[in-house]
Image (spheres, rainbow, N blue to C red):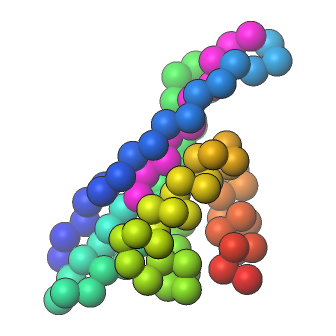
Amino acid sequence: MRIVEIWVLHNRWESEDRNWIQYRYALVEYAENGKSEYAIRCSVEGKHASEDVLCWLHPRLAENETDAYEVLYRLACRQISPVHLEDVLADLAG
C-alpha cells in the first residue's frame, strides 16, 4: 500500500484581530493494487495551530486525481476550516 500527500495548498489571511491565519490542505492518495482512494487532510498552522483533520472523499467526488484536486482547490478557496471539513464534504457528496 502506498500512502502519499500528492498536493498541498495553503491559504493565508489576516483575521479581525490582525493576526495571520494559515490553513493547510493536503490531498492524500491511498493506492493499492492499482486502485486509488483519496482523502483531504486539513489543519491550521502557526499561532492558531490545530490537530490535523483527515476526511475521506466520497468516490463520487473523487473518481480520479483530477477530480480530487478540484475538491481540494474549492475547499482552499472557500477557506473551509478543519472543524467544518467533514460537514462540507458530506454536503458536496450529497
Q: How many marks?
A: 0
Q: Which residues are magenta?
A: 18-27
* Residue at image location 66% in from the left, 80% down from the top: 93
Indicate yes or no whether the magenta region holds residue 46.
no
Quadrant for the N terminus, please. bottom left
User: Does residue 4 lie above or below 93 as drawn?
Assistant: above
Q: Position of residue 46 (x, y in %)?
A: 52, 22
Instruction: Answer with left or right where residue 13 lies relative to residue 6.
Output: right
Q: Position of residue 12 (x, y in %)?
A: 59, 28
* Residue at image location 65% in from the left, 68% down from the top: 89
Considering depth in this image, is 29 or 70 the residue closer to the camera? 70
* Residue at image location 75% in from the left, 73% down from the top: 91
- Which corner quadrant of the image does residue 32 belong to? bottom left
Indicate yes or no whether the magenta region holds residue 25.
yes
* Residue at image location 50% in from the left, 85% down from the top: 59
User: Does residue 19 lie above or below 77 as drawn?
Assistant: above
Majority secondary structure of magenta residues? strand
User: Does residue 5 lie above or below 65 as drawn?
Assistant: above
Instruction: Answer with left or right where residue 52 lies relative to residue 17.
Output: left
- Which corner quadrant of the image does residue 35 belong to? bottom left
| Residue 52 seen from this side | no
The residue most toward the top is 18
Q: Position of residue 36 (x, y in %)?
A: 30, 80
- Which corner quadrant of the image does residue 9 belong to? top left
Q: Position of residue 85 (x, y in %)?
A: 65, 58
Quadrant for the C terminus, please. bottom right
| Residue 41 seen from this side | yes
